[in-house]
Image (cartoon, helix red, strand yellow):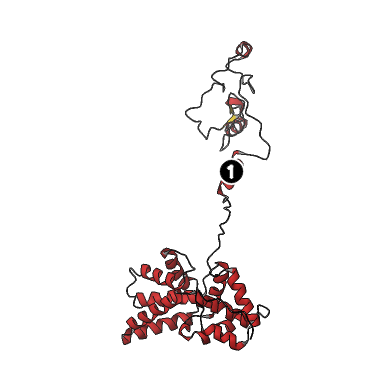
Amino acid sequence: MEENRNRRYNLRPLPGGRRGTPGAGAGCHSMRTTGGGGLNRRVPPKQSTTADPIRCPNSPIPEKSLANTSLYSTPTSPPYRTEMPPRSPTSSPMSEDVVQEAYAAQRVPTPGITSARKRWNSEMNEFIWRNYLILTKNEPNTRSYLDTLHQKFIAAFPEMDISRQRIGDQRRAIINNKLLPQSTLDGIRNEISTLIQTGNIETSQTNLTQSTGTRMRWSNELNESILRTYFEVTHIETDMRANKKKLHTKFIEQHPHLSHISEQRLSDQRRAIVNNKMTTEERIEQIRYQTENLTDYQMTQIMTTPLTETDEPDFSIR
């Protein structure tokens, strides 16, 4: 009975100092390297690994260490081992690489250059969608339309300096991101379908080209008229309530041939005149002074009779 127990439970010591029934983890750390570390049997060592201690090629081997070294000794820290420079407890090679990569990824500020995202308003999106349907005949032919669409857009909105690929991306974003209401998209599509069925699509393109040409030609007289109207409706910038609608209404009354221009487009042009210095600061101050001091009759005469380059503004109040 006792012999059966010994056979069943093999309690004899195992080689290498291991004891117990061999299993999944038995003896996995029984072998030691020359540095005293455990050697995992399940992970084979590299082919370039040797049993010799690490030593620099130019460092001499002390005689004392050779005398005390044996095949079975496991020196923990040989005197000829090259020591690595100390590291801080919080730093690691990976963290240093991440920090260096973060520094390299930072953009270098360039003086005089401001990077700002383009703002797409509803008028621009409707322009892109309408012309896209016109050029593609309501989407049966979607090839080779991008160049023409890009040219028309730049002609209509010269302040938007963008590439043809950006126009194509914006056209897809109008549909995918729902930048325009579905009712607006369907209404424009139905309008283009009617033009195609009646054969008036060429006339529509001609009218659109003419209106586009008008929009891109902002003369000095038109810019000055915008400034005069702006100063008048805002009472020299003292009343800014609903100035966009007032500016558009009064400007269209003076220039009915520009009725296709929207409120937003006219407001953008007013800001572009000041920000892009399309008119000198001295001329803007003169227009401000005229608007503040001249009567309504004199202001109407000035607006209806554009100044030439040789004319001098008359500031006298009669």
Q: Quadrant of the C terminus?
A: bottom right
- Disc 1 marks which residue? 100
Q: Is residue 70 above or below residue 93?
A: above
Q: Does the rendering let one see residue 295?
A: yes
Nearer to me, 256 or 206: 256
**Number of numbered discs:** 1
Q: Secondary structure at mark 1?
A: helix
- One can see residue 234 in this view: no
Find residue 204 and report its horizontal and vertical position in percent.
36, 82
Would you place residue 10 above or below residue 55 in this image?
A: below
Q: Is residue 51 above or below residue 116?
A: above
Identify which residue, 199 or 157, lies in the foreground. Answer: 157
Q: Residue furthest left?
A: 199
Q: Closer to the camera, 71 or 257?
A: 257
Q: Is residue 225 above or below residue 149?
A: below
Quarter of image, res 302:
bottom right
Tag 1: residue type?
Gln
Query: Which residue lies at the image location 59% right of the left edge and 38% below the top edge?
Result: 93
Q: What is the crowding at mark 1: few (fewer than 14 residues within 10 Å), some, or many (at least 20)?
A: few
Residue 176 image position (x, y, % from top left): 47, 71
Residue 84 in picture, x, y percent from top left: 62, 28
Q: Quadrant of the N terminus?
A: top right
Q: Residue at x 51, y 83 (%)?
A: 305
- Front-lying residue, 32 or 75: 75
In x, y percent, where is residue 155? 42, 71
Looking at the image, residue 185 sits to the left or right of residue 292; the answer is: left
Q: Which residue, as the protein is rendered here, is positioned at the far bottom?
A: 297
Residue 189 lies in quadrant? bottom left
